[in-house]
Amino acid sequence: MEKQYETVIGLEVHVELSTESKIFCGCSTKFGGAPNTHTCPVCAGLPGALPVLNKQVVEYALALGLAANCQINQYCKFDRKNYFYPDNPQNYQISQLYLPICHDGFLEIQTAAGPKKIRIHEMHMEEDAGKLIHDEWDDCSLVDYNRSGVPLIEIVSEPDMRNAQEVIAYLEKLRLICQYLGVSDCKLQEGSMRADVNLSVRELGSKELGTRTEMKNLNSFKAIARAIEGERARQIELLEEGRPVVQETRRWDDNKEYSYAMRSKEDAKDYRYFPDPDLPPVRISDEWIKRIREAQPELQEEKAKRYMEKYGLSDYDAGLLTQSRHLGEMFEKTAAICQMPKKAANWYIGETLRLVKEEGMETEDISFSPEHLAELILMTDRGELNNKTAKEVFRMIFTEDVDPVVYAEEKGLKTVLDTGLLEETVAKVLEENPDTVKQYLDGKTKVTGFLVGQIMKQMKGKADPKQVNQLLSQKLKEAGEKA
Ligand code: ADP
Ligand code: MG
Ligand code: ZN
């Protein structure tokens, strides 16, 4: 019988923190400055410069650790990881090996087979490296140290994932937590979230772990899914041929859909780790942890649950509205102003998300004023705008954040609430369509749709459909009595 294999995956995820300044100096962490302008003797690795720990980094690590159900090492230390590479000016990276700030946590993900806990081995604080730019034009390599010293948290999972869906669910969960906490924006494409995939295969039912490889350079969920498929197939093929899987670091090439060996996997001992003598250990008091815990914002699951209870939204809708903290906050503002939460929810879930998709945006980047949408909802409710015009006006709110009252006034979009004019128009349409009226009186009530359409057309779309329907049925009734 053919052998069956199981994939085993553990992730090492680096998250770039959204602090103002770097982890061990006061330089800016802003992305995209002119090369080497966000640097100082500390992050440029000049001899004799001394690092000073940024307190915010510890607070972010604690917040993330608590949200991921971790234990805290209240006495934690920094270690030097020694290696030479031109993007690493000190010739060592300050990281944590022996006493990382957080350990033994878990995140719960949803899988096809129900909820599943993915254990977290540890989380530690460390500094990012600079960036090498290989300039083929001038045939030289350049280095930019702006990123050197930007704070990172590395989150190391246990090998608990079994397929790409679980990996993506785990990363999405982690990203959502980071975003809600304001710890990081976690954009894979921009490198503020980077996931290394450790993968091995073993015969189904086996208790022992197979030899793993580590894959780097994965900058989208799609690339991650393809890399997992590709590496699983490669390893199974080796095993089927009776050849060993070599423990190594591989680079995934998403264009060629194949991974290449980068280097044989180094062990901790290769880095000659030792405690950093320039940084004192960090003592984290019970009070400090308590303060962080109390300041923790409402996370996605709690928020979704509250929306279901408070606003009577469905599970699905609450999930859509809480897909980013920003979107949820906008929805709540709009709902509070117009006092119509269901309608507000529908505008966000429907038109807003549709336009976000159409524009290829992220929900984080929605920038119209929630007040303007609230105003639009109120106008629609008062019958000043019909649904069709409301959608037109909303597009202008979404793209240019116009004030709907001013905009509708200027463009003459408001519904004509002049009953006299509407009555005239209804009468005129009935007169022009005697056959249709006859059909109606013969019991074909469906034809009212046609009549409403004609009336709206003559009103140039600026009539309140509710009012039109009322008047029309009244007039038809009168016509019936006459006949
Ligand atoms: P190292 O320190 O050498 O990088 P770790 O023990 O820290 O090794 O593991 C790194 C990552 O690899 C962790 O996420 C872990 O879950 C995962 N991992 C370890 N062994 C395996 C294996 N046999 N198969 C799949 N993943 C593994
Ligand atoms: Mg490791
Ligand atoms: Zn600096």
Image (cartoon, rainbow, N blue to C red):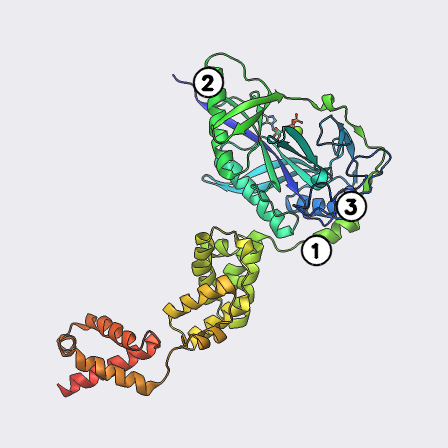
Q: Is residue 444 left or right of residue 148?
A: left
Number of other residues with Cα within 10 Å of mark 3, as a class: few under 14, some 14 to 19, many 20 or more: some
Q: Mark 2 — residue?
A: 237
Q: Mark 1 — residue?
A: 295
Is residue 6 visible to us here? no
Sequence-first disc among 1 and 3: 3
Quadrant in the picture for the N terminus: top left
Q: Mark 3 — residue?
A: 54
Of residue 67 and residue 455, the one placed in the foreground of this image is 455
Sequence-first disc among 1 and 2: 2
Residue 66 in the image, given as x and y percentages of width and height: 68, 46
At a point 41% along the width and 69% down the height, the residue shown is 390
Type of the residue with mark 2 = Glu
Q: Is residue 128 left or right of residue 441?
A: right
Q: Is residue 6 left or right of residue 475?
A: right
Type of the residue with mark 1 = Ala
Q: Secondary structure at mark 3?
A: loop
